[in-house]
Image (spheres, helix red, strand yellow):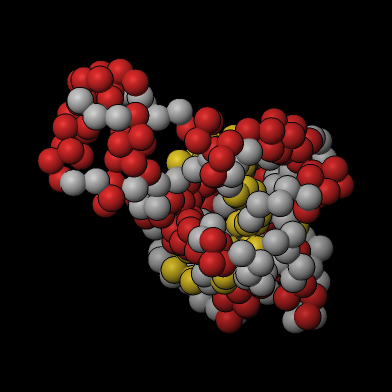
Amino acid sequence: MRDVSRLAGVSTMTVSRVLADPELVSEETRSRVLAAIEQLGYLPNRIAGSLSSQRTNFVTAILPTLTNVNFADTAQGLTEALRAADYQLLIGYTTYRIEEEERLIRAMLPRRPDAIVVAGTVHTKAASQLLLRADVPVVEIWETPAHPINHAVGFSNYEAGRAAARYLLSLGHRHIAAVGPSTTGEARDFRGEDRLAGFAAVLREAGIGGGLVVQHGDVPASFDHGARALGVLLDRAPDVEAVFAVSDLSAVGVLMECHRRGIRVPQDLSLVGFGDFDIGRQVVPALTTIRVDAHLIGQRTGELLVTLLDEAAAGAEPAVVDVGFSLVERGTTAPAAPRRRSRRDH
C-alpha cells in the first residue's frame, strides 16, 4: 500500500478507502489509485483484512466429485451467485467417503471460511459436531432433511425414487427392478441409496414386492456398473420388464448391455434413469429420466448464503429450500406388452 500511495501521490489511508469504501473518494483520486494498483500488480492482503473485519470472503464447498456433470453444474451455479457478492469458492471433494469429508472439514475450518456447503446429510459424528460448532452458516445440499444441521437446498431423493416406481407401475409393468452401486466399502452414495429405498417402498405398497434391487459394484455409478448390474439382475430375474437405474450413467450402461444381448428397449424392457445427463439425450432410444436442476441448486445455495452473510440476517431461522424434480419421458419407456419369452431364450 505504501508503494501504491507513493506512485499515486496520495496517503496510504486514501488507498485503503479506495479499496474499502470507494464512494468516499473523488473520481479523479480513485482513478489515480486504481491506475497505480494496476501498474504495480498490487493485491490486497485478504488475511490481514479478515483480522479486523472477521470476514475472509471465501466459502467452502465439499462435494463428492467434480467428474459428475451435475455436481460440476452445482459448483458453477454456486460460484456465479457468490461472485456477484465478491465471495470466492474453495472446493474440496470426498470421492463419496464420509471420512474424507470429515478430514476436509477439519482442514477447511482453520482457514476461517465465511460459510460451509456440504453435499448430503450423512456425516460422521465428529464431522456433524464440527459443523454444529462452526459458528458460520452451513448448507447441506442435494437433499431436504427434516432436521438439517443449519440450512438445506435440494430435493427429496426418496421421493424421486418413489416417482420412478409410480411411473413404471402406471405403464402397467409389474416385474420391476432397480440397480445401484454396492452399499459395502468406504465409498457410499447415500443419496442414491435413498432413491432406491423410495423406489422399493412404492413396489411394496403396490403389493408386488420391493426386494428386486440389485446393489452391485463400486461407487460412483458408471456405464460399466450398469452393464454388469444388468447381468446380475437377469440371472436373478430373467423376466424383468422394467428397470430403474440410480444414475443416468448406470442407465446408459444398462441400455448398451441390452443392445448387446438383443433385448429391445422399450419393447422388451422399459428403462428409467436419474440425473438427465447429456448422454441420456443422445443415446438411441433417448433415456427417460428423473431431472433435477443441478445448476439451480448451486444458484439457490449461493443466494441463500449471500442473504445469510448480510449483517442484518444474523441469527436467521434455518431454511430448507426444495427445488423439486421432474420426470422426463423419452424413448426408453413404453406401456407393458404381453408377456414374452424369458431373457435366457434370447
Q: Position of residue 4 (x, y in %)?
A: 28, 23
User: Looking at this view, is 23 or 256 the one in front?
Assistant: 23
Residue at left 52%, top 30%?
48
Q: Position of residue 121 (x, y in %)?
A: 72, 55
207 vs 322, left or right, is: right
What is the tally of numbered marks visible in this picture? 0
Q: Quadrant of residue 336?
A: bottom right
Going by the picture, which residue comes out furthest to the right? 125
* Residue 14 vertical position relative to residue 1 in the rendered view, above or below: below
Q: Position of residue 189 (x, y in %)?
A: 70, 47
Residue at left 62%, top 77%?
166
* Residue 19 vertical position relative to residue 303 in the rendered view, above or below: above
134 vs 64, left or right, is: right
* Residue 136 vertical position relative to residue 334 in the rendered view, above or below: above
User: Looking at this view, is 328 or 303 the one in front?
Assistant: 303
> In this view of the protein, can residue 147 be seen by the observer?
yes
Residue at left 74%, top 34%?
106
* Residue 165 vertical position relative to residue 65 in the rendered view, above or below: below
Going by the picture, which residue comes out furthest to the left? 28
